[in-house]
Each structure stands twice: as C-alpha cells, then as structure tokens.
Image: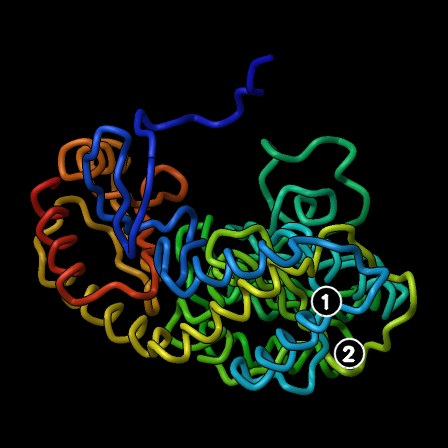
C-alpha cells in the first residue's frame, strides 16, 4: 500500500526535538520557528510533558465518554480561570476542524438558522461545515456546500450589519488573527462593533482561536486584545503540544442536551492529562508573557533589517507574517536547506513565524541572523 499523496514535502526527515530545536536523521540541527503549524506550545519533548505521558499511559490511555472521567473535570477547572472564561462550558474533541464543526452546529441548534457569515483569508478546517466557511474552492467538494455562507472582507462592519439585518444569520465565525490567510489582525474597533451587532441581533459569535489562542498572541486568546467576549471559542493546536486534542468553550447561554454533541476519542484520559500539564507549564514558565516579549523583540529586529521586497510586517506575540512583493519560495528554501530554520508560509508571498512559546532572546537573535543570511 502507498500513502495517498496529498502533501508536498520538504526533503527533511525530522527525527527528534528538544525545546525549539529539531534534528533530522543525520543529526543536523534545525531552529524550529514554525512548531509544526503552531502546534508546539511549550517546546518539543518538555520533561514535564514526557513525564505526564509516561505516567498516564501506564495507567490508562483511553476509555469512552460512557463513564466518568475526572481528568476532563480537572482540565475544565484548570482552563477556566487561566483563560478568563471560568463561567463557560467545555466540550472536548480531537482537532480544530472538529471544534469548528461543533461550534457551527451549536449555533444552528441555538438559533434555528443556517446561514453563516465568514471572512475572506480565513481558514477554519477541512471537514464539511468548517470547509464550507473557508473561502478556498480548491479544498471544497460539491458535497460541502450544505448551507449558505456570506464571505465578507475583514473589517467590513457595514457588510456584516446589512447581512444580519436580513434576519437569517445563525452565526459569525472569525479568527482572532488569521493564520493560513497570512497573519491579518482585525482592528479593536471592528471586533467591538462585530460583538455589538451580533449580540443585539441574537446572532452567535464564534471566535476561532485554534492557531491564535493558547498564549501565542501574548494574551491567552487573541480576541482579548480587543476587549470582547464571544459566545463560543474554539481551541486546538497548542492545547496539548502535539497530541491530537481540541476543545469548544461554550457560553452559559447554551444549555447542553444529552446526545446533541458527541465524540469517540475526544476528551480521552491521556489527552486530558497532557492538556493539564501544558497549562501548568504555561503558567509556571510565564510563557504567555514570554510570547509577548519575544514577539516584540522579533518585530523590532525585523523592522530594523533591510529586507528586499518587503511589503508589510504583521504580527502579535509569536504570530508574525512577513509579506514580500514577490514569492517567498527561494527565501524559505534557503532558510531551511542552508540556514536550517523551519518557517511557515501563507499564499505565495507571506512567511509565517510561529515558534514554540518557550523561545529565548538568544533563539530570536539566531533566527534574525540566519534570516538576514538567507536574504
């Protein structure tokens, strides 16, 4: 049997990692400033994480949601006060796409409607409802077009108001910071107006914090920079530092109903234990503050450089986009194969910088020097 060949791959085999570095099978070290799509939050192979994995796996990896799981309760009780949503409810699943799928489903249950407002440049996942609110025809099959979606430009509050005024909108879904779309940050004014128009018209506001959440922006959630509280928040990626895990944070205005949502693997024992440890490390090592500080240092360093063809620098915390007026491919390849630095990308012209939250100023200096050499 062969693999279904859908991934364009770099000619690198990552063998092991530590902190914000990985090594290939030949022993070559790489600075990881991508974290495997922003998944690595507390660093590769953190000792506390490995200890939790070993201890929990030796006891119980999985049992279904047909029995009580105190680790789920422990995670919810730990997450609530840390993220500022102690009064919300937590539903656990396996991936970001699944989180958004359930968020959209809840909004439709709650309102009895099915139209969604989403934004261009956004990415919400590849499952049926999530990909339908992602404006990318290349990844949408005909079967995915199961409900109407109005796609608007980020910041178009007038367009949102006009669409909601028609009375058929169930929810608005928006990223705290757009990731795959190229690190676009909404303004506080737009986000506050968006919260007001949705609340005034009983439209559910869903914040997709799958990439921008868990401290990456320098606050626990990126939307907290804008002073708003959405009705539903979706999280994944950094929640368990590489273990497949995700969650939906749900406002008290939603009353749970037996059987309304469900999952086989979501909230499993090992995932909950690892997610608890991630939160402990984030707090004890002050990683949210570190993300803010190192992000500011990186942005200042990038601004001081003479970057040929630079169009715009965008970012908050450790979520940074470097947009060129030409394709990034050559620079990214030189970074990887000559300077041994992993970076991400968006579209054809944007490099994405999404390192683990544990990076140091020394790591930032190494990146800046290698980036300069790659230019």
Residue 264: x %, y % from top left: 78, 50
Residue 196: x %, y % from top left: 65, 82
Residue 265: x %, y % from top left: 72, 51
- Image depth: mark 2 or mark 1 in front: 1
Task: Determine which residue is flagged by label 1.
Answer: 91
Quadrant position of residue 230: bottom right
Left or right: where 135 falls relative to 325: right
Q: How many numbered tags mark residues here?
A: 2
Write the residue at 19% across / 41% down. Answer: 29
- In this view, which residue lies farthest toward the top? 1
Write the residue at 46% across / 50% down. Answer: 181
Q: CA distance from mark 2 to mark 1?
A: 25 Å
Label ID, residue 71: none
Tell me if mark 1 has few (under 14), some (14-19) or many (20+) residues whose alpha carbon lies within 10 angstroms of its own: many
Write the residue at 74% across / 83% down. Answer: 200
Task: Determine which residue is flagged by label 2.
Answer: 201
Q: Is residue 137 above or below residue 308?
A: above
Task: Work out whether residue 17 or residue 247 is closer to the camera in this orientation and state it.
Answer: 17
Residue 134: x %, y % from top left: 61, 47
Write the residue at 61% across / 34% down. Answer: 139
Which secondary structure lies at badge 2? Answer: loop
Quadrant position of residue 204: bottom right
Left or right: where 80 falls relative to 16: right
Q: Is residue 256 above or below residue 109?
A: below
Quadrant position of residue 93: bottom right
Quadrant (top left, top right, bottom left, bottom right) of the N terminus: top right
The tag earlier along the polypeptide, 2 or 1, is 1
Which secondary structure lies at badge 1? Answer: strand
Tell me if mark 2 has few (under 14), some (14-19) or many (20+) residues whose alpha carbon lies within 10 angstroms of its own: some
């Amino acid at each position: 049997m062969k693999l279904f060949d859908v991934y364009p791959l770099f000619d690198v085999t990552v063998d092991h990692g530590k902190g914000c570095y990985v090594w290939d099978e030949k022993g070559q070290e790489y600075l990881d400033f991508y974290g495997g799509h922003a998944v690595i939050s507390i660093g590769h192979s953190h000792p506390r994480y490995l200890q939790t994995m070993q201890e929990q796996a030796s006891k119980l990896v999985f049992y279904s949601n047909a029995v009580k799981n105190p680790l789920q309760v422990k995670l919810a009780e730990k997450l609530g006060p840390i993220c500022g949503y102690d009064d919300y409810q937590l539903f656990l699943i396996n991936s970001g796409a699944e989180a958004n799928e359930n968020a959209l489903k809840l909004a439709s249950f709650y309102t009895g409607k099915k139209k969604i407002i989403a934004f261009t440049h956004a990415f919400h996942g590849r499952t049926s409802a999530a990909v339908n609110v992602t404006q990318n025809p290349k990844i949408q099959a005909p079967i995915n077009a199961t409900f109407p979606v109005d796609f608007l430009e980020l910041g178009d509050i007038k367009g949102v108001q006009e669409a909601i005024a028609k009375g058929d909108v169930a929810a608005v879904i928006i990223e705290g910071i757009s990731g795959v779309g190229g690190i676009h940050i909404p303004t506080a004014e737009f986000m506050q107006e968006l919260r007001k128009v949705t609340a005034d018209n009983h439209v559910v506001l869903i914040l997709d914090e799958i990439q921008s959440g868990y401290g990456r922006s320098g606050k626990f959630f990126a939307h907290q920079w804008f002073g708003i509280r959405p009705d539903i928040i979706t999280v994944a990626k950094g929640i368990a530092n590489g273990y497949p895990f995700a969650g939906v944070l749900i406002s008290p205005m939603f009353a749970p109903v037996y059987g309304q949502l469900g999952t086989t693997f979501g909230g499993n024992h090992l995932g909950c234990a690892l997610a608890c440890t991630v939160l402990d490390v984030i707090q004890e090592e002050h990683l949210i503050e570190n993300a803010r500080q190192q992000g500011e240092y990186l942005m200042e360093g990038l601004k001081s450089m003479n970057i040929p063809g630079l169009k715009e620098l965008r970012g908050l915390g450790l979520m940074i986009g470097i947009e060129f007026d030409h394709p990034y491919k050559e620079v990214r390849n030189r970074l990887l194969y000559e300077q041994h630095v992993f970076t991400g990308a968006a579209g054809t012209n944007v490099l994405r910088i999404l390192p683990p939250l544990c990076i140091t100023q020394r790591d930032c200096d190494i990146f800046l020097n290698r980036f300069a050499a790659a230019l």
